[in-house]
Image: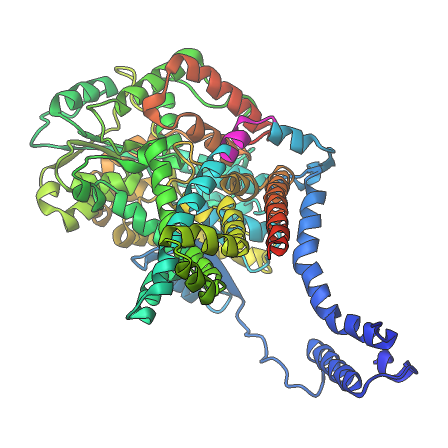
């Protein structure tokens, strides 16, 4: 059915304010950052502003700092998202199947997600500190966690997991509600064991929900800033790409170089999103093929 | 509005209503944005110009008292209001530079960390001092403090408070304080693990430690012109070797790589460590928090690197600059000079524990009550060294602390070269740091 042109125009008119708002608050800054990244532009020396083409990008991409921070960011992203998925699943099943105190269980699980990231990062920093913390006493260790790369990365990933597993669990629980109970009951009648029911029925039906949860968390984890900034300030080679961007843009006031870093982070995020959406798309297509 | 009146096409009634509402909203928006004679006017401007003084949130109230005092003495010429900035110097700068780069006229007087002078002056964010007020702000001030407020022959701020590090030690375990780093490290290694408390985190404090060691060894980070890297071979290697040894077990704590001034202070107050490199605020703190430690707490000159050659320690502190976009620059100069006057420096010393920049105040009885180590402090300040004087100081400091952290991984031979290369790039504002 074709729409009447007037109605069509009205539709556009009505969404126009939202479109304008979106362009102003998202598209404009992104484009402006792209534009700035082509200049040598330091806020301290505004007179020396000059067009340098892709020099800033070459400078960033040929820098050891960028690749190391990208590596760190990927370690943190993969490490935290993988564990969050497993733990989140366990919690989602728990919340879904809880027989009594369902509301209490759900509230309790959601508490870490309600805590501000900076506060959570500081709390865990103090907890792992040898003088003020309880972790060493609990494990009978004498370890200065944040002074070495491996253990510092562990603390950062641990904090991330503690903080955002509830988010993962919430999204997965929404996916669990999509699985029809009669399918599971039918499978049980056919003699499928619990493990079989989980892997053959629940998991395939939840695929879209899992992919959405993974996509959200991966994009989020890739942009990690506050936990790293609070716990190590990027020391011990734990710098994430966002911390590098912060140092260049905010501390050194180098708008050109900093914008180049920001644009590269944006490109990475787009790549991750495209990869996921492709995976997501095929999963959906396959889901439709199956009866 | 034109949309409503000129449109001849049939518009669904609901859409018509929506458009009318939209038009009404737009009219309202434009009305409130203009100076409408029907709307009530803002209250008339107060007669006394208000000057806003951006400075870190001083806890004792000494700065607020100084602001009140200067407002009163101005006799209605101006009023000074303190605006609190974060305690951390990096965060103070972060807030200020963005506003100054955006030409914020609200910033009249700035409590500037000594390392900001070249940057703010070059960027044109502060106004130079001249004439009688400049003379007044220089007279009787410690030379190093005046130097910290100057850049390129001009005075850019009034020296207000200053600070530097001393060596704090336990008199019950150490009979004579060590004169050199080598002596201190020898003593520390025999006293057991974590005997020395210092600053080893990757931040400004690490740059300060390196700068003091390098200057005491007879070197400097930048050359005379301030645009090229100096780092003479021998002194740099000596300084790096000391840092390396300091970070090696058993002299320092295992947490050295994450220690700042405050972690060092807290650790010293537990009573276990025997030495600490730190600022003067640790003295009143120990008396309050750990009297039994304070009873056995001695002070001495920051250890030398070369025997018989007194140490040269990095100077810190706050100078008062006048914002370039201030609405009342002349009044702001007057107010800043008043805030940095002798009376207010005495107040900041007595109440806030901030060492004055006026040399004569170190003989004042009440100031000496606050700083029983006043003579040592003045003597150290007279030989004090400036951190690199360049508008690119933040890049330079970032480059130093990045390259030398963690101190336990320093290889003096290799790191002299690495440091030179990274500083060279920082001075050309190239590449990531």
Q: Is residue A111 visible?
A: no
Q: Residue at x 85, y 72 (%)?
A: A2
Horizontal relation, residue A70 to residue B64: left or right: right
Q: Residue at x 67, y 52 (%)?
A: A29
Residue A9: x and y in percent read: 83, 73
Residue nearest the observer in this picture, A114 or B51: A114
Direction front: furthest residue: A190
Residue nearest the observer in this picture, B37 or B374: B37
The image quadrant that residue A35 belongs to is top right
Q: Is residue A149 visible?
A: yes
Residue B213: x and y in percent read: 34, 23
Horizontal relation, residue B349 to residue A80: left or right: left
- As for residue A250 lying within the magenta part, the answer is no
The image quadrant that residue B357 belongs to is top left
The image quadrant that residue B65 belongs to is bottom left
Overall secondary structure of the magenta stretch?
helix
Residue B48: x and y in percent read: 52, 70
Residue B95: x and y in percent read: 50, 52
Question: Image quadrant for the N terminus of chain B?
Answer: bottom right
Query: Which portion, as a residue range, is magenta?
Result: A62-70
Q: What coloring was used for the rendering?
A: rainbow
Residue nearest the observer in this picture, A71 or A194: A194
Q: Residue at x 39, y 48 (%)?
A: A86
């Amino acid at each position: 059915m074709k729409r009447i042109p007037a109605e069509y125009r009205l539709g556009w008119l009505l969404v126009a304010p939202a479109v304008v708002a979106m362009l102003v608050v998202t598209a404009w800054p992104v484009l402006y950052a792209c534009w700035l990244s082509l200049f040598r532009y330091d806020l301290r020396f505004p007179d020396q502003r000059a067009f340098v083409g892709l020099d800033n990008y070459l400078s960033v991409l040929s820098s050891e700092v960028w690749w190391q921070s990208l590596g760190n960011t990927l370690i943190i992203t993969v490490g935290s998202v993988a564990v969050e998925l497993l733990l989140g699943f366990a919690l989602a099943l728990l919340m879904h199947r809880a027989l009594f105190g369902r509301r209490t269980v759900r509230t309790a699980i959601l508490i870490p997600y309600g805590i501000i990231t900076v506060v959570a990062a500081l709390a865990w920093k103090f907890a792992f500190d040898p003088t003020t913390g309880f972790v060493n006493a609990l494990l009978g260790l004498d370890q200065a966690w944040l002074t070495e790369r491996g253990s510092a990365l562990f603390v950062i990933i641990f904090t991330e997991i503690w903080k955002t597993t509830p988010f993962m669990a919430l999204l997965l629980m929404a996916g669990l509600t999509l699985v029809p109970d009669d399918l599971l009951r039918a499978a049980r009648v056919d003699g499928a064991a619990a493990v079989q029911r989980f892997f053959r029925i629940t998991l395939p039906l939840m695929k879209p929900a899992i992919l959405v949860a993974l996509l959200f968390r991966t994009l989020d984890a890739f942009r990690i800033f506050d936990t790293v900034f609070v716990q190590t300030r990027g020391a011990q080679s734990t710098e994430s790409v966002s911390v590098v961007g912060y140092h260049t843009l905010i501390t050194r006031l180098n708008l050109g170089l900093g914008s180049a870093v920001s644009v590269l982070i944006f490109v990475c995020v787009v790549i991750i999103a495209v990869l996921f959406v492709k995976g997501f798309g095929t999963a959906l297509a396959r889901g439709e093929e199956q009866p | 509005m034109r949309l409503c009146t000129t449109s001849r096409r049939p518009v669904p009634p609901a859409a018509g209503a929506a458009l009318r509402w939209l038009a009404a909203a737009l009219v309202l928006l434009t009305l409130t944005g203009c100076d409408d004679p029907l709307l009530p006017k803002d209250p008339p401007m107060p007669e006394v110009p208000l000057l806003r003084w951006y400075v870190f949130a001083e806890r004792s109230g000494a700065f607020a008292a100084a602001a009140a005092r200067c407002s009163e003495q101005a006799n209605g010429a101006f009023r000074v209001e303190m605006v609190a900035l974060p305690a951390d110097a990096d965060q103070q700068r972060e807030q200020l530079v963005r506003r100054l780069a955006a030409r914020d006229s609200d910033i009249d007087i700035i409590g500037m960390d000594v390392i900001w002078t070249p940057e703010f002056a070059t960027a044109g964010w502060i106004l130079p001092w001249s004439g009688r007020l400049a003379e007044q702000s220089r007279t009787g001030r410690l030379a190093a403090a005046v130097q910290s407020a100057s850049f390129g022959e001009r005075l850019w701020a009034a020296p207000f408070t200053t600070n530097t590090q001393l060596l704090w030690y336990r008199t019950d375990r150490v009979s004579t304080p060590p004169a050199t780093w080598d002596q201190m490290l020898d003593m520390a290694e025999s006293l057991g693990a974590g005997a020395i408390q210092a600053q080893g985190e990757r931040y400004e404090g690490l740059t300060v430690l390196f700068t003091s060691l390098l200057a005491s060894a007879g070197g400097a980070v930048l050359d005379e012109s301030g645009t090229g890297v100096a780092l003479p071979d021998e002194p740099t290697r000596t300084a790096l070797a000391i840092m390396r040894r300091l970070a090696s077990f058993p002299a320092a704590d295992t947490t050295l790589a994450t220690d700042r001034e405050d972690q060092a202070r807290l650790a010293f107050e537990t009573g276990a460590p025997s030495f600490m490199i730190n600022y003067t605020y640790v003295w009143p703190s120990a008396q309050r928090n750990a009297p039994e430690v304070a009873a056995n707490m001695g002070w001495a000159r920051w250890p030398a690197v070369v025997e018989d050659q007194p140490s040269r320690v990095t100077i810190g502190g706050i100078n008062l600059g006048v914002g370039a976009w201030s609405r009342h620059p002349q009044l702001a100069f007057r107010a800043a000079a008043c805030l940095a006057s002798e009376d207010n420096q005495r107040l900041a010393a007595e109440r806030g524990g901030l060492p004055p920049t006026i040399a004569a105040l170190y003989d004042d009885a009440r100031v000496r009550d606050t700083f029983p180590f006043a003579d040592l402090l003045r003597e150290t300040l007279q030989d004090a060294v400036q951190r690199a004087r360049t508008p690119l100081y933040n890049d330079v400091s970032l480059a130093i602390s990045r390259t030398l952290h963690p101190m336990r991984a320093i290889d003096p031979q290799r790191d002299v070269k690495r440091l030179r290369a990274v500083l060279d790039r920082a001075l050309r504002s190239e590449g990531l740091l």
